[in-house]
Image: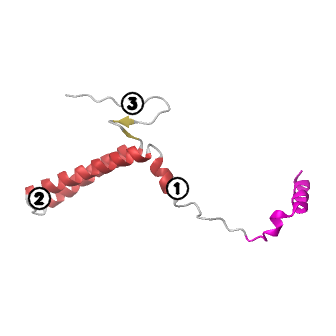
Amino acid sequence: MKKYRINKGIGSNVEFKGLQAQYLFYFAAGLLAILIVVMVLYMTGVTSYVCLSLGLFFSGYLIYKVFTLNKKYGPYGLMKLQARKYFPKYIISRKDIRLYFNSNLKLKMYEKFS
């Protein structure tokens, strides 16, 4: 039986066959979901060739997609991508623009806080 080495050094991410961090979870959860779907299809009476071909197709697509995302975004990239949608597209300032260029006002503000 082949033994695979899992890199789990102190302070570093878990890595297995090049997959890092959350991609391991997505990979394992995806394979489990595909297995359950194929089993349900088989129990409902779908032929075994159709179940096998669907399982192989979706497993191959899952492997391709997870490794592509891992290579493109890295260990924290998906979290950064998800957080990016919560950033505002622009910041609205309702102050008059002349207040920003008035140096006397800036001096008064600095005196107030110092």
Distance CA(mark 1)–CA(mark 3): 28 Å
Q: How many marks?
A: 3
Which residue is under mark 2?
50
| Residue 7's disc number | 3
Q: Split into 4 quadrants, where in the image is the N terminus? A: top left
Check contact, mark 1 vs mark 3: CB within 8 A: no
Q: Which of the two residues, 109 or 38, is positioned nearer the viewer here?
A: 109
Looking at the image, residue 1 lies above or below residue 55: above
Q: Which of the two residues, 107 or 19, is positioned nearer the viewer here?
A: 107
Mark 2 falls on what kind of element? helix
User: Residue 15: x percent and y percent?
Assistant: 38, 36
Which residue is under mark 1?
83
Distance CA(mark 1)–CA(mark 2): 39 Å
Looking at the image, residue 16 lies above or below residue 82: above
User: Residue 24: x percent and y percent?
Assistant: 36, 43
Classify residue 76 as left or right of residue 59: right
| Residue 103's disc number | none
What residue type is disc 3 on? Asn
Q: Earlier in the sequence, mark 1 or mark 2?
A: 2
Q: Residues within 10 Å of mark 1 (few under 14, many from 20)?
A: few
Check contact, mark 1 vs mark 2: CB within 8 A: no
What residue type is disc 1 on? Ala
Residue at image location 91% in from the left, 54% down from the top:
111
Q: Which of the two residues, 14 or 95, is positioned nearer the viewer here?
A: 95
Residue at image location 48% in from the left, 51% down from the top:
79
Distance CA(mark 3)–CA(mark 2): 38 Å
Q: Is residue 103 magenta?
A: yes
Q: Look at the image and give the residue range highlighted in magenta.
A: 94-114
Q: Earlier in the sequence, mark 3 or mark 2?
A: 3
User: Residue 60: x percent and y percent?
Assistant: 23, 49
